[in-house]
Image: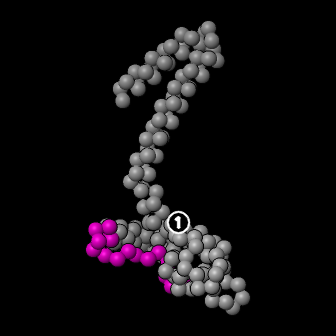
C-alpha cells in the first residue's frame, strides 16, 4: 500500500518537472497510472464480491423486501438473514420468494386463451419476469412446446 503512495507522489513530482517541457504528456502519464491502479483495485473488489456471491445475496434480500413489502423492512431483513443462515446450515427449508397467488397471477397473465399450458416462450418470459436465473429452459412437457401449470410452479 505504501509503495503505491510513494509511486503516486513520485509521479506527481515527475509531472511537475515534465509539465514545462511536455505540458500534455505529463498529466496524461500520471492519469494513466492512476487509472491503472483504480482498474486493478476494481477488478480485485469485483472478484471478491463474485467469489462470495455477494450480488446474489443482495438480489435475494432485495427481492424478498420488494415482493413482501414488510411494514418494518429492517426487522424483516434480520429475520430473513436468520432463516437464510439456518437454511445454509441445513436446519430449515428456504423461504419462498413467490407465493402461490403470485405464481397464479403470472401464469394467468401469460396464458393464451383458456388453456392450462404455457408456450415455451411464455415460460421463459415468466421466469425472466420473476427473476429466476437458473432453470431448465426446456422442462418436462406434457404437450410438446408447452409447459403445464404444475411444472411451472415447481420450476418457479
Whether residue 4 sits left or right of residue 123 in the image: it is: left
Q: Which residue lies furthest to the top in this view?
A: 21
The one nearer the camera, 45 or 11, is 45
Residue 10 lies in quadrant: top left
Residue topped by disc 1: 133
- Residue 81 higher or lower than 151, as above or below: above
User: Residue at the spot x=42%, y=56% of the render?
Assistant: 54
Residue 107 seen in render: no
Residue 89: image quadrant is: bottom left
Residue 109 location (% of width, % of height): 66, 82
Residue 30: percent from left, percent from top: 54, 22
Residue 61 seen by the camera:
yes
Residue 44 falls in which quadrant of the image? top left
From the viewer's perspective, tell me whether residue 127 is left or right of residue 55.
right
Looking at the image, residue 17 lies above or below residue 57: above
Front residue (pair 96, 28): 96
Instruction: Please name the residue shown 37% across and 70% down the image.
Output: 80
Q: Is residue 67 left or right of residue 112?
A: left
Residue at 64% from the left image edge and 76% from the top image edge: 120
Query: Secondary structure under badge 1?
Result: loop
Scheme by which the image is coloured: one colour
Q: Quadrant of the N terminus?
A: top left
Expressed as whole percent of the image width and height from the top left, the position of residue 77 reads: 39, 68
Residue occupying image coordinates x 46% and y 46%:
46
In the depicted view, which residue is nearer to us: 56 or 121? 121
Determine if the magenta segment contains residue 87.
Answer: yes
From which residue to which does the magenta span run? 86-104
Q: Position of residue 151 (x, y in %)?
A: 53, 82
Q: How many marks?
A: 1
* Crowding at mark 1 (Cα within 10 Å: few <14, some 14-19, many 20+): few
Amino acid at each position: 500500500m505504501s509503495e503505491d503512495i510513494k509511486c503516486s507522489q513520485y509521479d506527481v513530482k515527475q509531472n511537475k518537472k515534465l509539465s514545462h517541457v511536455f505540458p500534455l504528456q505529463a498529466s496524461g502519464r500520471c492519469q494513466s497510472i492512476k487509472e491503472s491502479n483504480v482498474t486493478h483495485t476494481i477488478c480485485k473488489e469485483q472478484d471478491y464480491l463474485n467469489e462470495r456471491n455477494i450480488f446474489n445475496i443482495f438480489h435475494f434480500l432485495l427481492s424478498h423486501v420488494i415482493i413482501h413489502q414488510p411494514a418494518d423492512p429492517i426487522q424483516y431483513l434480520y429475520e430473513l438473514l436468520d432463516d437464510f443462515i439456518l437454511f445454509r446450515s441445513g436446519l430449515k427449508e428456504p423461504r419462498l420468494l413467490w407465493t402461490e397467488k403470485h405464481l397464479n397471477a403470472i401464469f394467468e397473465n401469460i396464458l393464451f386463451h383458456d388453456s392450462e399450458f404455457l408456450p415455451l416462450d411464455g415460460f421463459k418470459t415468466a421466469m425472466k419476469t420473476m427473476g429466476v436465473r437458473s432453470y431448465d429452459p426446456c422442462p418436462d412437457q406434457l404437450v410438446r412446446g408447452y409447459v403445464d401449470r404444475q411444472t411451472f410452479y415447481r420450476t418457479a
